[in-house]
């Protein structure tokens, strides 16, 4: 093989055609003619105009042949091929309905729609594009006007993701943020009240998404004696999970927090009203994210942040501000997986009398014995049962 052909093969990755599944159309086709209704009206059936349709039947209408680059396996092998001469890479900063705001590698900001093929692919995800995605986009031709205004573009492909924070939402997977390194689990000591079981759910979600957890106990300025939370802090510290006390009002703990955020991509997650946006405003004074006070009647947070957005840090790194949630439901977790999400269970699991022990009712269960001897926190074991039986938070 000549050198020119070798260079060409390096420039152009191999292409191949594959069949991909498309979303199933759940809506019924509208009937153009209703013979029964026309017969009742007195019109003869022979007088009704007819036409012949040729359309795909069954599975043929739910598949499509696409050209891929043929690299990798599984999800990576099904990526549509893109023209690197006409497309550029970028990162999704936020998603507004059908439009995605993307920061291109050329330094420009683009308002992008999503290629129809990507929206038609069969998936269990709530949205095909999410905050933090690395995408390939095709810029639209530049038009006159403000040169600093965002340009238009079309997202042609979404690269494979890593580091996910996901949850279940109406029977589908909601990817809150993608391609992040760590999850900052924000809770308030007061207003709203601290929910330790919600910490455990977020820790499980972080473990499933392969994220490094960081617990932030905010609004320390409202608590007369923060030392009462020392046993809770100490327990998570023994598991190797950093716990920081912070206050967006006084600035307490913010310098320590900056060290954990430096050169990392961090998603801030937690229930409404705990102060996620307030902490980011304190870290980035020029940000001016909208915030609202906790309801005086219910002492619960009000939904203020309505979409996730990726924000750059001046000293390096990124943070993702996310909407608050009232409860966190994990996406398609198997009961056999739950024990692996609790670090303190791992030394005791091999000591159980039965290899398939569920740690709920069996005799000779080493986990239950460790709970009785206070080797494992009863509260953490309670969180395990809630995840194992998939109980909503208000049923714990």
Image (tube, rainbow, N blue to C red):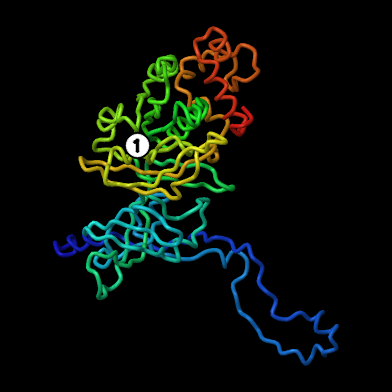
Q: Residue furthest bottom?
A: 47
Q: Position of residue 47 (x, y in %)?
A: 77, 92
Q: Nearer the viewer, residue 323 or 361?
A: 323
Q: Quadrant of the C terminus?
A: top right
Q: Residue furthest front?
A: 296
The quarter holding residue 153 reads: bottom left
Q: Quadrant of the N terminus?
A: bottom left
Q: Position of residue 95 (x, y in %)?
A: 41, 55
Q: Nearer the viewer, residue 386 or 388?
A: 386
- In the image, residue 3 above or below residue 203: below
Q: Residue furthest left?
A: 3
Q: How many marks?
A: 1
Q: In the image, is 219 to the left or to the right of 30? A: left
The quarter holding residue 265 reads: top left
Question: What residue is rendered at 54% in x and 60% in y?
Answer: 23
Q: Position of residue 294 (x, y in %)?
A: 48, 37
Q: Secondary structure at mark 1?
A: helix
- In the image, residue 81 above or below residue 265: below
Question: What residue is rendered at 40% in x and 29% in y?
Answer: 219
Q: Position of residue 370 (x, y in %)?
A: 53, 11
Q: Residues within 10 Å of mark 1 (few under 14, many from 20)?
A: many
Question: What residue is rendered at 76% in x and 79% in y?
Answer: 34
The quarter holding residue 36 reads: bottom right
Residue underneath mark 1: 279
């Amino acid at each position: 093989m000549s050198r020119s052909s070798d260079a060409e093969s390096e420039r152009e990755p191999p292409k191949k055609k594959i069949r991909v599944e498309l979303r199933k159309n759940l809506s019924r086709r509208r009937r153009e003619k209703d013979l029964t209704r026309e017969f009742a009206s007195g019109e003869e059936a022979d007088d009704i105009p007819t036409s012949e349709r040729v359309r795909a039947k069954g599975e043929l209408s739910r598949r499509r042949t696409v050209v891929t680059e043929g690299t990798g396996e599984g999800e990576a092998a099904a990526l549509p091929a893109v023209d690197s001469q006409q497309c550029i890479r970028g990162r999704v900063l936020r998603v507004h309905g059908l439009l995605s705001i993307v920061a291109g590698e050329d330094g420009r900001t683009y308002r992008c729609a999503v290629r129809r093929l990507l929206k038609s692919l069969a998936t269990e995800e709530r949205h095909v594009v999410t905050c933090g995605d690395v995408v390939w986009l095709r810029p639209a031709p530049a038009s006159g006007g403000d040169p600093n205004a965002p340009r238009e573009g079309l997202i042609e492909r979404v690269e494979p993701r890593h580091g996910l924070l996901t949850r279940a939402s109406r029977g589908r997977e909601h990817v809150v943020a993608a391609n992040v390194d760590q999850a900052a689990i924000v809770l308030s000591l007061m207003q709203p009240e601290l929910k330790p079981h919600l910490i455990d759910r977020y820790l499980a979600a972080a473990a499933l998404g392969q994220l490094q957890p960081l617990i932030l106990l905010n609004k320390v300025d409202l608590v007369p004696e923060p030392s009462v939370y020392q046993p809770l802090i100490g327990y998570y510290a023994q598991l190797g999970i950093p716990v920081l006390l912070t206050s967006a009002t006084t600035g307490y703990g913010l310098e320590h927090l900056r060290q954990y955020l430096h050169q990392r991509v961090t998603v801030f997650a937690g229930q409404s009203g705990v102060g996620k946006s307030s902490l980011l405003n304190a870290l980035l004074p020029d940000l001016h994210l909208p915030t609202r006070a906790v309801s005086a009647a219910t002492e619960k947070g009000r939904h203020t942040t309505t979409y996730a957005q990726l924000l750059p840090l001046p000293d390096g790194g990124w943070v993702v501000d996310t909407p608050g949630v009232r409860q966190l439901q994990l996406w398609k977790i198997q009961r056999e997986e739950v024990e692996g999400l609790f670090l303190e269970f791992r030394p005791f699991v091999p000591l159980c009398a039965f290899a398939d022990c569920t740690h709920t009712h069996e005799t000779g269960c080493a986990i239950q014995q460790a709970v009785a001897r206070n080797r494992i926190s009863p509260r953490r074991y309670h969180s395990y049962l809630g995840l194992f039986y998939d109980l909503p938070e208000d049923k714990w």
